[in-house]
Image (spheres, rainbow, N blue to C red):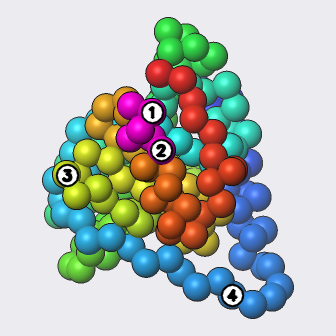
Amino acid sequence: MNRLIQSLTAAAALSCLGMFSVGQAKAEPAVAQTDRSHYQGKWLEIGRTPMWLTDGCVAGFTVYTPGNAPNQVMVQDGCREGTPQGKLKTIEGIGTLTDSKTTKAKLRVRYPLLITFNYWVLYNSPDRSWFISSDPDMKNLWIYARNVPSKNQLARMVSKAKELGYDTSKLEFPKF
C-alpha cells in the first residue's frame, strides 16, 4: 500500500510538469452522456495505458459507491500483484462529478496525499456494459467492462478507442 501511495504521489508530481509544456494546445476530447448509475458497482480494468505505478498490477478494478453529496462518488481502485490470485492492493478516493448538471462524464478523484486525477468518460457502449475513459489530454486511456470480454468484444473495444483518436498500440491488457 505504501508503494502504491508513493507511486501515486510521484505520478501526480510528474503530471504537474506537463502543465508547463510549450506548444499548441491539444483540443479536449468530447465526452459521452452518462448518468449516476454509471458510478455504481464494480468495473473491471480491461485495458490501460502503461504507467509505472501499475507495473505488476493485474486483474484491476474500480468500485464506485454513492458519496454524501449529489455530485460525489466514493472510488476504490484495486489490483492484484503479479497474478489474478496475487496480493490485493487498493487505494480509495473521493470523486466529484465536475459536470454533474450536464453530461456527468467528468470525474475528478482525490486520493490520499492530495493526489488528484481527472477521468473523463469518452464512450459508453449502447448496452452500458463497457466504457472508455481518458484523462483530459488523452495521455492515459482506460477500457472498463462489467465482465471480462471475449476476444471479439475486446477487438470492438480497442477499435472504438482507436476511432476516438487514441494510439491503441500503447495499450496493455492485464490478466484476469
Give the residue at mark 4.
25
Mark 1 or 3: the one toward you: 1
Which disc is residue 127 wearing? 3
Residue 110 locus on image (x, y percent): 47, 55
Say above or below: 68 vs 108: above
Q: What element carries label 4?
A: loop
Q: How many other residues sit within 10 Å of disc 1, few (<14), some (14-19) or many (≥20)?
A: few
The residue located at (70%, 62%) in the rendering is: 15
Q: Which of 37 and 165 is in front in this view?
A: 165
Which amino acid, by three-letter code, is at mark 4? Ala
- Which of pointers 1 and 4 lies earlier in the amino acid sequence? 4
- The mark that comes first in sequence, 2 or 4, is 4
Indicate which disc, 1 or 3, sits on the residue closer to the N terminus.
3
Q: From this view, report whether residue 165 is shown above or below residue 84.
A: below
What is the CA distance from the residue labelled 4 to the residue labelled 3? 34 Å
Residue 154, image x and y in percent? 45, 40
| Circle 2: element type | helix
Q: Nearer the viewer, residue 12 or 144?
A: 144
Q: Provide the residue span drawn in magenta.
A: 150-155
Q: In this view, does 26 lie above or below 150?
A: below
In this view, the residue farthest toward the top is 85
Q: Where is residue 46 in the image (x, y as percent from the top left)?
A: 47, 37
- The residue lying toward the viewer, choosing from 54 and 146, is 146
Secondary structure of the residue carrying numbered label 3: loop
In what element is the residue under mark 1?
helix
- How many other residues sit within 10 Å of disc 4, few (<14), some (14-19) or many (≥20)? few
CB contact under 8 Å: marks 2 and 4: no
Residue at mark 2 = 155
Q: Is residue 174 above or below residue 63?
A: above
Residue at the front extreme?
A: 152
Residue at the spot x=33%, y=70% of the render?
A: 32
